Amino acid sequence: MAIAAALSRALDSDLWWSFRRSPVTMLSALVALVCILGAALAPWLAPHDPFDLATLNLGDAFKPPAWSAEGDALYPLGTDDQGRDMLSAIMYGARVSLLVGISAVVFSTVVGVAVGLLAGYLGGWADGLLMRIADIQLTFPSILIALLVDGVVRAALPRELHDRIALFVVIFAIGISAWPQFARTVRGSTLVERNKEYVLAARVIGISQLRIMLTHVLPNVVGPVLVIATLGLSSAIITEATLSFLGVGVPPTQPSLGTLIRIGNDFLFSGEWWITIFPGAALIAMVLSVNLLGDWLRDALNPRLR
Amino acid sequence: MAAFILSRILQAIPVMLVVALISFAMFAYVGDPVAIMLGQDFTEAQRLQLVHDLGLDQPFFVQFATFVGHALQGEFGLSYRLSRPVAELIAERAPATLELAFCAALVALLVGVPMGVYTGLYRNSWLSRAFLTFSLIGVSLPTFLIGILLILIFSVWLGWLPSFGRGEVVRIGWWSTGLLTLSGLKALVLPSITLGMFQLTLIMRLVRAEMLEVLRTDYIKFARARGLSNRAINFGHALKNTLVPVITIAGLQLGGIIAFAIVTETVFQWPGMGLLFIQSVGAADIPVMAAYLLLIALVFVIINLVVDLLYYLVDPRLRIGRGAAGGH
Amino acid sequence: MPPPVLSVRGLRVEFPTRRGVLTALSDVSFDIAPGEVLGVVGESGAGKSMTGAAIIGLLEPPGRIAGGEIRLQGERIDTLPYDRMRRIRGKRIGAIFQDPLTTLNPLYTVGRQLIETMQTHLSLSDREARQRAIGWLEMVGIPAAAQRVDSYPHEFSGGMRQRVVIALALCAEPILVVADEPTTALDVSIQAQIIALLKRLAREKGTAMMLVTHDMGVIAETADRVAVMYAGRIAEIGPVRAVVKAPKHPYSAGLMASIPPLDRKVAHLAGIEGAMPRLSAIPPGCAFNPRCPHVFDRCRRERPELIETGTTRAACWLYDPASERQAPELLRHG
């Protein structure tokens, strides 16, 4: 309840007003919405099923986009080397990218917020230890952490098992690479709140520490966490795409946008540019719109930072 | 000064030990090196002999100490994938990565800092707006996509620059350099821009934000009230104060360049450590991964140290605080 | 009387904002004679500091001079291009800011800041400039100046830093110094020293000074004449003795009454009821009328200009022979 109340407070009219005032923000919200809907509803909206081998026709391979001379109206954005419709492949790919991105962000939010609350509330050596770990991890770029986690899990698990849970491995790897940002922010806010009089008072009258954290401290960190989560979503999507491009991300049976770009990269020199460029453009549209929304959210929630 | 460096080195040791521990844990517990080295046919006696030879029957801390001892001598065992000493593989690949990272850092700093200063000083000009838009796109573009776009434009369509490899290299001792031949330099252009782009936009935004912050301070207003020239104010007083935070973050970011080289090297088939690492991740080649992790940690620690030293040189407040008794 | 060093006539400063143009200063006029110290007092937001900023040509954007003129030794300076005005700042008009902890660049030694200021305005060799920098530090009372010249600002205490700031303001020997609340940020024990230093240096160098402060004690001690500002206008201006001892404008009277007299005990300080209006809500007529104990009809209708009262000039209808009410005797105090 407290979270819901804080959310409605954060999303009050000021936020809406600044949203309506910024055409760039409205446009990026529209683009993000199109991406999310297109991805979520891919099985119903996509013109073809790129995974249905029966409909694949190698004769249709390497068709350029519909508007060029050799194009085919059946495949608006052309086809790849297997004769797969690019538009459908992109919609399904965006689905995987978004799914991994959102799950990873949720994962790192939960871990980061929990660690931050604990560290800030407990203080002392627990705080020191947790934040030291966060600091050490923050020294390394998240892509490196994600690669290492992915590599270690790959080495530790039998191949067949790994293939089955590869998607979760990627989510875990990306999620674990991003928790320190959340933890640090939440810890900072927790420290501020912890020493306020009402929290001290609540402690004195014996309200449980867990309850104090959930009812008093948590609502105060919703705003910053929301901002980090939004900006984190775009970097999670980029990290996933990068891992998949490097060939260690999602399994080939569930291609994401990064996988599509990796496949298309092989045909860059033979002139089939659309196999790379269209998934790339979709990825950019998604990341850019989420980034712009995140920037707007940060400015709107923190007028001082402008 | 010496005490300062020493304290920083002492602080870095625990970090290196933690990374070494992770590295060792990977080495010792992920996968089964004995099974991998023995192959299919072996007797129990052979297995025990190998376990003994590898020191795997020793207590944990003895094994860890042995690992650290070997690591200090650059000894990381054999690559599972290539069956060659890991140290040799890395030494072979290091020059390519270091030259690439150096050029990328140069691109990021030489372009990013002036752009940041310009957008900070003339924040309402159309050029500043163009730079800001560019930086926003820059942070939203995944590195590999920048590489692909550059290859498409400059290699495939225009045919100006090579899209893969280092070109001709010249050997100087054990170091192989691409900086001395025309084809080597041409080969460096696209990868350096690709690798430097993210850091470039980041440094630009950072310098701009700091510049705006500094220009609002009282001492800049007072410098104007003293009638100093704009040049002296902007490039002397303001820029120097901007540098303090920029050095820290830019320094750490330059460390990031080495890590991001993994992606760029894959796109451009650049024969460096990053490509070696990614091939090792794909093949679960733990010794190479462990060594690479330690090496990167070492690079980060060194960069941190250099950043601290620069900071120390730029900001007199630190010097006094740490040197003689505080002057307050 | 010699021609004034500074002459401000009908100065008007506006701030364009989203909700319309705010007038921060209007019809501000005064002169400062050579070597004279003009005190400018008023509550915060009355426009004291802004008047100083307008004179040195460093109004914070989007503020701008929208009317009137500022003359320095007869030369009009409010319309000069930035670079010509820059050559006047520091050289002919020095400035002292409020907070010495933030006005010095932390990364340069005080000597370097002095030297660059002098070399910008005077043609001096490096050696001469350094010698003079040390001389100035001695003059403002910094012990061991020859060594301290190479110290960084954070190595000085607040009071010492303000001495450095004073040296910086005076080192090119300006004919006028604009001092904006030079003691407000300092410890009470140091304020008197800094004021004494400023007063002594101004007298020795023959520098005129505009001393902006809200501290009436400082004014009474230092200034030759006083301008009392209220809501962006001058309410009263005249010799310091007359304004402090026998203020004519009801606002000045209230302000003077709020100084605790040192020689006897008072039951309570006679402050002024209410608060100064915001710039966006200045009432018609006299801006002070809602708070004025002597308000009458005309005050609510017409805005008073400065009127000769015998000893000072006050913007108050009580002193206009045509008004239906005349100055009461009860304005006396002390």
Image: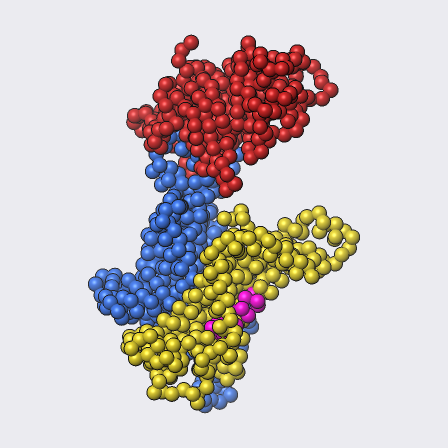
Chain colours: A yellow, B blue, C red
Q: Is residue A106 magenta?
A: yes
Identify the residue at horizontal 33%, vertical 55% (top origin).
B106
Q: Estimate the x, y position of residue C168 in percent, counting from the top left.
A: 42, 27
Can residue A200 be seen here? Answer: yes
Q: Is residue B74 magenta?
A: no
Q: Is residue B112 left or right of residue C164?
A: left
Q: Estimate the x, y position of residue A43 in percent, counting from the top left.
A: 50, 79
Q: Please say if C235 is above or below B50.
A: above
Q: Estimate the x, y position of residue C222 in percent, counting from the top left.
A: 53, 17
Q: Please say if C76 is above or below A297.
A: above
Q: Is residue A286 left or right of residue B196?
A: right
Q: Estimate the x, y position of residue B6 in percent, counting from the top left.
A: 46, 50
Identify the residue at horizontal 51%, vertical 64% (top origin).
A233
- Magenta stretch: give its range: A94-108
Return the residue found at the far left: B182
Identify the residue at horizontal 31%, vertical 59% (top origin).
B103
